[in-house]
Image: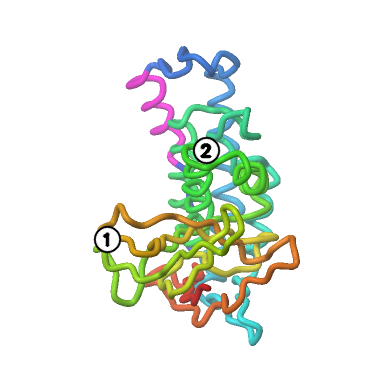
Amino acid sequence: MTPYTAPVREHRFVLEELLEHEVLSLPGFEEVGADLVEAVLEEAARLTGDVWAPLNASGDRQGCVRRDDGGVNVPDGFADAYRAYAEGGWNGIGVDQAHGGQGLPEVVASAVQEMLHGANMALGLCPMLTAGAIEALIQHGDEVLCERYLAPLVEGRWTGTMNLTEPQAGSDLSLVRTRAEPSGEDGVYRLTGQKIFITWGEHDCAENIVHLVLARLPDAPRATRASRCSWCPSSWSTTTELQGSATMSSAPPWSTRWASMARRPVC
């Protein structure tokens, strides 16, 4: 197998020669120096080259396996590699310290993300989607949602997904049929519908998976802006159950057959 060598030199060129580390002079990055950034890049190169890249082989040979209970087992080594990533604090590298992250500039976090995808694209899709869920929470979540979901997502104990596509709705999200109807409890909606092609929609790498589900409100006009996003965890900490939510199939997504793709009914 061809080894992966992270392009640290190229990332340093962008940061040092093109950007001249100007981002480090911005407010909020007073404690971030060039030496720290270089150390982060070198350690990310080690993680991706030594731990993540070799798993492409087991991913090709095994793929993801759907269990009888609807869960999905990832290929050998994937769960350990993800946990090493999460326990190292990499999941929150670009998240503000006020939210439990490392507080590094986004340009540094993007460089690390590029290494993750270059080493193992299938595994790299998992933290990429979680980063999107974290950003959605920070920008639009209320205090209750942030208190419940933000910390475990930033720490990597939970992962996030993006539930947009449906059998009849791909790029045109105005065709979404999944419904979000008020349950009578403040801030709680009942979701009904089906989502497909949910990358990392089921796996055994983390304690919980939080699905960000795009759904249509009652009597909403046929337009994309008439939809809302709902937070739907796979496992609930209360007695409430997520009825009917299970992985119906674990489809191989093109060349990354070892990145779990789920087709899920939601209610």
Counting residues from the N terminus, which is met first, the one under dot 1 or under dot 2? 2
Up the image or down, 129 lies above or below 17; here it is below
Question: SS class of the residue under badge 1?
Answer: loop
Between 83 and 166, the one nearer to me in the picture: 166
Q: Residue at x 62, y 66 (%)?
A: 234
Q: Residue at x 48, y 17 (%)?
A: 24
Q: Quadrant of residue 165?
A: bottom left
Q: Residues within 10 Å of mark 1 (few under 14, many from 20)?
A: few
Tell me where the magenta segment starts and ends, as one range: 7-19
Indicate how the structure is coloured in the image. Answer: rainbow
Q: Indicate whether 229 appears above or below 265.
A: above
Q: Are marks 1 and 2 in contact (CB under 8 Å)?
A: no
Residue at the location (27% across, 60% down)? 221
- Which sits in the foreground, 9 or 173? 173
Question: Which residue is label 1 attached to?
Answer: 221
Which mark identifies residue 264? none
Residue at the limit of the structure toward the front, as seen here: 184
